[in-house]
Image: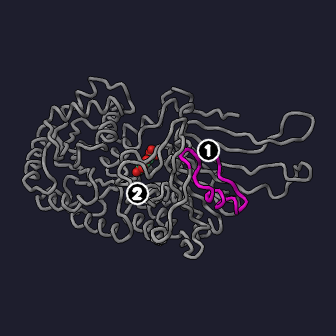
Amino acid sequence: MSVVTSAAAAEPNPLREGLEQERVPDASVLVIFGAAGDLTHRKLIPALYSLAHDGLLPGGQAIVGFARSDFSDESFRRSLREACDKFARTRPTEDAVWDNLAKSIFYIQGAFDDPAAYDRLAAKLAEIDQACGCGGRRLYYLAVPPPFFPVISKNLGEKGMVGDPEQGGPFTRVIIEKPFGHDLPSAKELNRVAVTTFRERQVFRIDHYLGKETVQNLLVLRFANGIFEPFWNRQYVDHVQVTVAESIGVEKRGNYFESAGITRDIIQNHMLQLVSLIAMEPPVAFEADAVRDEKVKVLRALRDLPRAGMESVAVRGQYAAGSVLGEHAEAYQKEESVSPDSKVETYAALKIFIDNWRWADVPFYIRAGKRLPKRVTDISIHFRLAPYPLFRKNNQVATQPNVLAIRIQPDEGISLKFESKVPGPTVRTAPVTMEFRYATSFGAEPPEAYERLLLETMLGDSTLFARRDEVETAWAWLDPLLAAWSQSGAPQPYPAGTWGPAAADQLIERDGRKWRRP
Ligand code: BG6
């Protein structure tokens, strides 16, 4: 069964156009530290190109790459063009759009700890201000590992390259990438360093899940519709499931993953953000602090995981050799830069509770894993059965619970499963689904998360960024689990290409429920 939506396929959406026109920011200089790396090539520049392609970048927006590698402006632009050809959402690259963007892209070679390099950078920025009309507005993107944050912010501060918003004047903002720490103490230390040079409202912590259209749509689904809110609570919801599954392994990131594991890599940030958005109370306004105040309350209400019997609510696994999407996949322990007796988890499943009035005793089952059968991120709200089962078969309840499934990716959309009468002379029921698909309703694939997030940093709206207290509260809750796991034996093996270890199935089946197969 399909739902006819009002936005017909391929028709321009006037509401969206109006919004986009209103939201063109002032031109600034975006300085990317670590510009020779993967993130710049795979995500940042392709996103900036797509913004330019869609007419959303302000005229005169400039980009300066800063890194140790040896590039000239020209060779830097060439390598970025190749990256756009491969990775931009809006492909093939259009020469006119690229040429226009490329003329405002520059490169400064330098080491992060060399004060002289910052003098060269400052001189270049002043030159660009004159040529492009950027008026001293600065965005510093730290696409570098966290150990470099202190030295970069110290140098920017000492060279007088950071404006103070309390004094007025052109803005300076700093954008940082996860990991925001390894545990609570290291996260606090990073945050302390950040606020010695910048004020909290100048700091934009990227969690790219918040830039996904479907994740933002969680708020719209919940708070722009009257029908969902009345049953979005413990009275009607039996349980909630969240799955972040990936078919890829750790690829070339063995080194990083060995110190992270899936819990730090996905659960601490992306998944807890999803849980907060599903569970939060309505904010008083759709405004950065109002939204983040409500999200952090959910994190504060997370029930501590029990120290005794932790294994009944927390399961970790590690992929062994297997086959994913028809191809042989090596075991995690055989991946590049991974220890052959590594105990790092590539899969984790947790049963968690949010101790507040709305969610008391409603379990949230969440799981994330690498080398699972497919790439899918899916949230499902499982409702209680109707109070009295009128429709029975052989004296058994013949109906299934309603499920609202929110497909974050791929095949972005929402479906509602409900019971329907099977046509015919007898009263037989069967589950059917109502479907909403982004691609069908809006005639386009949603933009990349980084497009939206970069635009928001230019606009200075931090609604879609993690606030300091969110990050620290998430670590405070997870630290005991991570500490317990670091003291216990090895994670349970699961063959690559399966849905994780058997213990993860038992975690939910023990409660008479089952993981949804998205
Ligand atoms: C990153 C993780 O934050 O998110 C990666 O570090 C993971 O390990 C990636 O693969 C998943 O992002 P997405 O957008 O593909 O779901």
Please state which amino acid type lies under the numbered disc 1. Answer: Pro
**Quadrant of the image occupied by residue 462:** bottom left
State whether residue 273 is above or below residue 27: below
Residues shaded magenta: 495-518
Image coords of residue 502 (percent x, y): 63, 56
Q: Using the rendered view, name the quadrant where residue 8 is placed.
A: top right
Is 511 one of the magenta-colored residues? yes
Spot occupied by residue 379 in the image (x, y as percentages of width and height): 58, 50
Instruction: For residue 282, say whether it is visible.
Output: no
Q: Residues within 10 Å of mark 2 (few under 14, many from 20)?
A: some
Image coordinates of residue 26 in percent, x first then y, are 26, 43
Q: Main secondary structure of the magenta part?
A: loop
Q: Is residue 11 above or below residue 203?
A: above
Instruction: Name the residue tied to disc 1.
Output: 518
Q: Looking at the image, is 346 positioned above or below residue 51?
A: below
Q: Quadrant of the C terminus?
A: top right
The quadrant the N terminus occupies is: top right
Q: Position of residue 186 (x, y in %)?
A: 33, 68
**Residue at left offset 17%, top offset 32%:** 75
Disc with the residue nearer the chain's start (1 vs 2)? 2
Is residue 407 one of those drawn in magenta?
no
- The residue furthest front is 340
Its colouring scheme is one colour
User: Circle 2 sits in a helix, a strand or a loop, which is it?
Assistant: helix
**Residue at the image position 30 percent from the left and 69 percent from the top:** 189
Q: Which mark is residue 288?
A: 2
Q: Residue at x 16, y 47 (%)?
A: 68
What is the distance, in whole Å, between disc 1 and disc 2 at their CAs? 32 Å
